[in-house]
Image: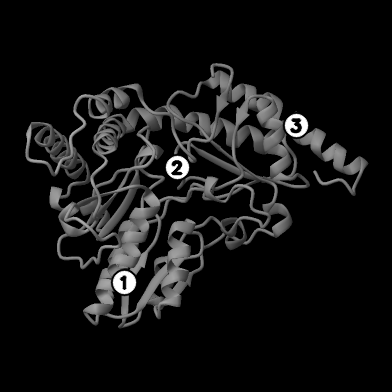
Amino acid sequence: MSSIIYLDHAATTPLDRRVLEAMLPYLGERFGNPSSVYRLGREARQALDEARQTVAEILHASPQEIVFTSSGSEADNLALQGLALAGRRQGRGRHMITCTIEHHAVLHTCRHLEQEGFEVTYLPVDSSGLVQPEELKRALRPDTLLVSIMYANNEIGTIEPIAELAAVAHAGGAFFHTDAIQAGAALALDVQALDVDLLSLSAHKFYGPKGVGLLYVRRGVPLQPLIHGGGQERGRRASTENVAGIVGLAAALRLAQENRAAYVAHCRPLRERLIEELLKRVPGTHLTGHRTERLPNHASFCFESVSGESLLVKLDQLGICASSGSACTAGALEPSHVLTAIGLPAELARGALRLTVGKDTTPEQVERVLEVLPEVIAALRGRTAANPSTPS
């Protein structure tokens, strides 16, 4: 692995050794079910309660407002479907608002809710991916139940003005959810300052384990469970809790937020180096996303006359891990919905590349990428020019 240059931290992050050490006891001798009354069960319950308390303190929430899930996608589904179904039962309205660049965990859930009789408005974004508060205000209706806008976009890194958008939603009488899954390592997660009613996170985006996430649900927000069975998570999500995973999530979130300033200070210069040099060294390069209001570790581009898929294959052969956008849509034939939503033509959108650095990325690794990437792009363009019938 030492020869690999990993620049796809938006897709997943390596498990922090300290997080693994916190998890290990609950993968071994402390294996009890937290619903059991004997000692092994009580030990597991104590670990679960401590993890919930840790998460709540970081989010400036109460422990009762934290629901542990199996993933960020499940957290998004529970937020949207759970609130929609509960709201419909209470007669609160059937209209929801989201935006066109959301993760598919939100967009596909909204499409499903439309089939169930709900109405969804999909807000446009500007060329940098920002949702304008004025657009949200115009879209609100008396029967709007929920607004869901992501904190930071996974493909282009743009950070949305969540507190401002939430204030608009609340003024219109709607609840507000944010998919904060890309924000865990880099942005503040104070739900009081953000003024959100629901917030989703996924551990593997901030050096925690895969297969565990959480949903913050403000006290008083109606929520119908999607998984039925036992009474776990205060009746909001049945299933024996993934104690080791939850312990890992809490440890990873604590480390991420304690070290956030250092993480940003490390990543931002590397991001800036990538952006400035690629725009300078590679003709026909387009930066995607907002130039400054973007995640500190996130650089994303579209290259003219290049296939993103071919580019990724060449980089992989050189030991460089990158992506063309969301890992959840890798291999799709259609251009990214995010890139077309910000106004890029389909042909240019197919030449997308996302480079996301992490806490262990070194300046030397970034320089290596800057050395080889222009050469790879030039070679791919030269092959296309020499044989126009051959895809690049």
Residue situated in front as seen by the camera: 227 or 250: 227
* Quarter of the view holding residue 257: top left
Inter-mark Cα distance, 3 to 2: 26 Å
- Residue beneath disc 1: 84
Crowd rating for badge 2 (residues with CA inside 10 Å; few <14, some 14–19, many 20+): many
Q: Which mark is residue 353?
A: none
Residue 331 at x, y percent in the picture: 64, 48
Amino acid type assigned to the residue bearing label 1 in the image: Ala
Question: Which picture quadrant has residue 52?
Answer: top left
Of tags 1 and 2, the one toward the viewer is 1
The structure residue drawn at horizontal position 45% and vertical position 42%, both measured from the top left corner, is 295
- Residue 376: which numbered mark, if any? 3
Determine the secondary structure under disc 2: loop
Residue 91 picture location, percent across and down: 24, 82
Of the two numbered discs 3 and 2 on the same chain, state the one appearing first in sequence: 2
Amino acid type, callout 3:
Val
**Quarter-of-image position of residue 246:** top left
Does 229 appear above or below 143?
above
